[in-house]
Amino acid sequence: MTFEDLNIISPILKSLDEQGYEKPTSIQARSIPLILKGEDVLGSAQTGTGKTGAFAIPIIQHLANDLENAKGKRKILSLIVTPTRELAIQIGENFSAYGKYTSLKSTVIFGGVPQRAQTNKLKSGVDVLIATPGRLLDLMDQGYISLKDVKYFVLDEADRMLDMGFIHDIKKLLTKLPKNRQSLFFSATMPKNILTLSNQILKNPKKVEVNPVSSTAETIQQYLYTTNKTNKGDLLLHILEDPKIDQVLVFSKTKHGADRTVRKLLKKKIKSAAIHGNKSQNQRQKALKAFKDGNIRVMVATDIAARGIDIDKLEYVINYDIPNEPETYVHRIGRCGRAGEDGIAISIGEPEEIQFIKDIEKLIKQKITVIKDNPFPQTDKPMTTSEKKAAEKEKQRIKQEFFANRKKNKGSQKGGGNNRRKKK
């Protein structure tokens, strides 16, 4: 099947050809005809399947027809809501690329940066608005945004949206949208709370499910190193001695862990950067651009930040920390081996994470190859229940002691300041 077979208009076909798109992916081939017919769609597709194109291409085609005889200031006719800044920017780039040869005007808004540049674009009028929930509601409250003309609404990455606590924002947003609209709902997973939310948004939706979350792409080779917790950093450096790994996305469980890993890599002269929620928008975009341009070899990311990383022909992904949710593992390794390309996913498992591996293998219904040639083999055993309780108790004690000492030090410094003022 080709895009011509989907009755895509020539301006979009021209831009798709320039982007190197030869044929639609499965989610595109199944969703585009439904959306062009005006159907609401409930789409389930894991990362790397071409999901953005599945809704962006038909929306651009709808709008190209709607705008043919439009006059006056542009009104927001399509709204796409997505959880992260990086993902919003990526979707915005896709709309600009696919709509290059149409008169479509789109813009992206998100928090973490001054709003003036965004509000200036809104004042000039846009057809498509791609937004994160917080900034969207903020600018609506300020009177910069009206949704009364929206014809096409997309909620993207719905499962991550709920994970990040946006459910109340989404419900508030739904009350502001016209009831007469076409709605598209995309999520990588479909637990009960997601289906409940979809029922509040969609009318008689057509369901499209491609590559369920329990599957991993056949083009991705999966490997596992087992080691002790204290040896993870050294093992990562050992893996990176392979010159073939010229660009790799490394997943960290925590923001602080990501920063710690980057510091260790930089000490060894390995060009690296971290991307997570504690970084400013400028820092994140600068690091992401450097990685895409090949100026950084290793990008260390948390799961939420990585949702916006979409890099063609990325071959390597490393799980520095193995996720306790098997579905998260599937999403992570889906960052490599995209669109039929080859990919290699490497996981570094400490004793406490071996059970996570077993859960992953159960979900994907295959064994992950264990690398035997390992200079830092696993010798420690997983902690018992009593040992875990003792470790957690000690962790809390150290934490309380730290804050108590910090409070004490602040008090003594304040007292010292008062004494100095008295002497004067």
Image (cartoon, helix red, strand yellow):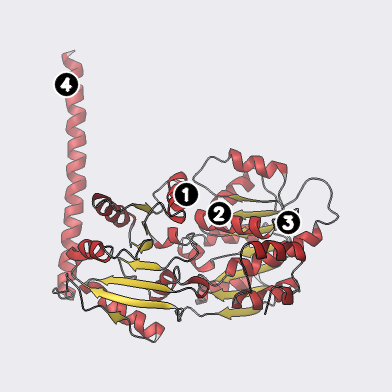
Question: What amino acid type should be assigned to the residue bearing mark 2?
Answer: Ile
Precedes in sequence: disc 3 or disc 4: 3
Q: CA distance from mark 2 to mark 1?
A: 10 Å
The residue identified by callout 3 is 101
Secondary element type, mark 4: helix
Q: Is residue 135 above or below residue 33?
A: above
The C terminus lies in which quarter of the figure? top left
Query: From mark 1 to mark 4, how far is it between C-alphas?
Result: 48 Å
Q: Dots 1 and 4: beta carbons under 8 Å?
A: no
Task: Looking at the picture, tell me which residue is in the foreground, 320 or 218.
Answer: 218
Q: Are marks 2 and 1 in contact (CB under 8 Å)?
A: yes
Distance between mark 2 and mark 3 Cα atoms? 20 Å
Q: Amino acid at mark 4?
A: Asn
In this rendering, would 11 be left or right of 353? Answer: right
Residue hosting label 1:
285
Q: State whether residue 172 appears in this view.
A: no
User: Is residue 361 shown above or below 153?
Assistant: below
Classify mark 3: residues with Cα within 10 Å, few (<14), some (14-19) or many (20+).
Answer: some
Q: Amino acid at mark 3?
A: Tyr
The label on residue 419 is 4
Q: Secondary structure at mark 1?
A: helix
